[in-house]
Image (spheres, rainbow, N blue to C red):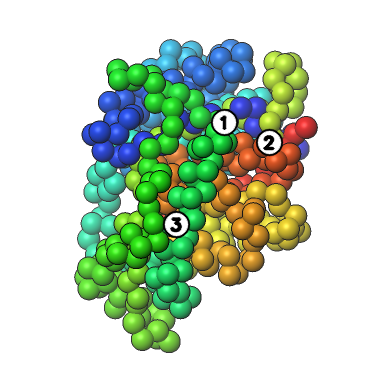
Amino acid sequence: MIDAFVLEALRSPRTKAKESGGLHELSPSDLLAQLYHALVLRTQVDPSLLSEVILGCVTQQGEQAANIAKTSALRAGWPASVAGMTINRFCSSSIDAIALAAMKVNCGQTPALVAGGVEMMSRVPLMADGARVFADHDFGVNHQMLLMGAGADLIASRGEMSRADLDAVAFDSHQRALRAQQEERFTSIVPIETSQGLVSSDECVRPSLTPDRLAAMPAVFGDLGKAGSDQVQLAKFPDLSEISHLHTAANSPAMCDAAAVLMIGSGEFAEVQRVKPIARIVDTVTCCGEPLEVVSGCVEATKAILERNRLVPSDVDVFEIHEAFAATIVKLRRELAIDDTRLNVNGGCIALGHPMGATGAIMAGTALDELKRISGRLAVVAASGAGGIGSALLLERCD
């Protein structure tokens, strides 16, 4: 089997999913085109040598529909020979895009290609595609599909978590992200040109956030419970007397706009093109946990990739795990006892933002940034999708 390597990993800043957000004026294709150009500039690889682009994108509607992986490559002026494929595994989509790219290299199908993800949530809002399993509660229940906030509150309830437990995760996420920004740790960010100038930093981090402000935020998913989610979850878990609705807008992931791309290739391709590989893609995993918990899949995927590679948490230098609501991180810490100095050390999606289809690829780049900074060797990147799905990568930094 041929080893697959990350040859470059770049991302845009994550900006607020509002009309006032720094990237809002750009279409998803225009944002991706800037990253494609940066990828070529960094690697000096002729795009005609790349077989395809594989992108994760959750809400494939409007500007993000019609196979944005292909249309964005054409928008960037890349050769017509570059194919494209857009995939949706909910919020783990771009991890699966990377995994699929690695498999294509591993089996010798291609020497090199691009993988990543995009989500412009200010222009193509969450659930704009009108998926019936989310828009029609009874229909969703018949498919064991609930909305993400309902699943997060179930995780908190089953784990007997307190509101303080969840708010502590959010506060820590913002503090770590703020420190990372101040120390310029996110070296995979590419400044993006807009009519207002360059956008070069993540916008969602809140320096003024305090524990008291977090505690004052109202819980937001009680209405989902009253609409029937509580009833369904309590029927499946009769040991629970009630569902505790503890998640707020502040201890949930922030919606945002962003994109990320990685060049994936074989060692031989890297040598011929004189590109120094950043990391080897050691392994990839996709699995599924409890569907009614909705967003606990990143925990199951982290466990699975460690077990399959006969690793314990202390063997891994960096864990970049999707903060798919604060309860997920509390669950992860309790079940795997990962040292806080290895887990989301530069903040996570609660503070930095969660551009669904791009999140996994962004986290992969952030993990590689951190491995380089600390001269570490191994990183695990994992994200949750809806329905209990989780996907993970194991990356080994190249010296």
Which quadrant: the C terminus? top right
Give the Cα distance between marks 2 and 1: 10 Å
Q: Is residue 256 visible?
A: yes
Q: Which residue is mark 2?
A: 372
Closer to viewer: mark 1 or mark 3: 3
Residue under numbered circle 3: 171
* Picture residue at 23% right of the left edge, 57% below the top: 135
- Which residue, given by chain and number where applicable, does mark 1 sit on? 187
Which residue shows up at 64% across the image and 66% down it? 337
Please state the horizontal and vertical placement of residue 264, each as a whole percent of the image: 62, 30
Q: Dot 3: few (<14), some (14–19), or many (≥20) neighbours within 10 Å?
A: many
Q: Position of residue 298 (x, y in %)?
A: 53, 57
335 or 285, which is in the foreground? 335
In space, the residues marked 1 and 3 are separated at their CA atoms by 23 Å
Tell which circle, 3 or 2, labels the residue nearer the N-terminal end. Answer: 3
Secondary element under disc 2, as helix, strand or loop, is helix
